[in-house]
Image (cartoon, coloured by chain):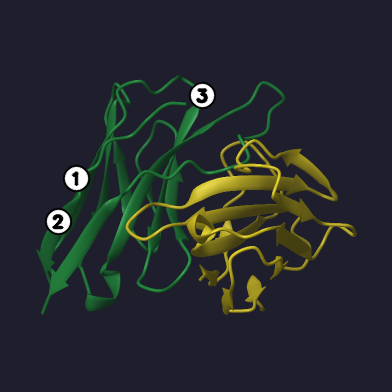
Amino acid sequence: DAKTTQPNSMESNEEEPVHLPCNHSTISGTDYIHWYRQLPSQGPEYVIHGLTSNVNNRMASLAIAEDRKSSTLILHRATLRDAAVYYCILRALMNYGGSQGNLIFGKGTKLSVKP
Amino acid sequence: GAGVSQTPSNKVTEKGKYVELRCDPISGHTALYWYRQSLGQGPEFLIYFQGTGAADDSGLPNDRFFAVRPEGSVSTLKIQRTERGDSAVYLCASSLSSGPGENEQFFGPGTRLTVL
């Protein structure tokens, strides 16, 4: 399974942008890059995903390097509610057209947000 | 609408006992996943159902663990002869299908299992 590397922890100030990096140097051409986050005492929740192009949604932006060996999750204005563990996950596109079923989580990056 | 629900939210049992953990997925979601999470770690995959059948059970740690989904909706994770090392938060997730790049997984709040 392709692996990802993330910093153990990061700190941010409230209302400032946050850039969460992820390295995935062994990514294959059909791996999608997914981000989930887990707030304290809750199950993980989906944030965003992409394949090659940068992606934006209401929660965040995902910037993918041209060689796809790294990506960055961008929270444009961090709030206290964004304090969570953020997981960068690769999902393989299987040859039958579906995605690999399960998510393979690492330890993620614990984001702290200071008021 | 209702999200994924799990019962009980907490379960304390004694070593050697049998436990069942229940997951109610989002209505209409055909895929269902079980994970477990130990303190300080990311969730670890256990088993994945597509409909009623287990599409991948490679994450089950041993034969004391078993899961069913008889009607393609509710699932039960069963643990026999529990051991202290089974203590963890057991998470359930569901998704619409296994489409390419899609199939966002929706997680429940988890069941915290403590084996004394």
Give the residue displayed 64% in from the left and 73% down from the top: B6
The disc at residue A95 is none
Circles 3 and 2 in contact, beta carbons < 8 Å: no
Element type where label 1 sits in the image: loop
Query: Which residue is denoted by mark 2 in the rendering?
Result: A10
| Chain identity of mark 2 | A
Colour applied to chain A: green
Kindly tell me whether residue B73 is visible in this rendering: yes
Could you tell me which chain the residue with mark 3 belongs to? A
Q: Who's the residue at 61% across and 47% down the image?
A: B46
Nearer-the-camera pick, A28 or A6 = A6
A104 left or right of A27 in image: right
Residue ID for mark 3: A30
Q: Residue at x 75, y 47 (%)?
A: B49
Q: CA distance from mark 1 to mark 2?
A: 7 Å
Local secondary structure at mark 3 = loop
Can residue B24 be spotted in the picture?
A: no
Q: Is residue B40 left or right of residue B85?
A: left
**Which chain: yellow?**
B
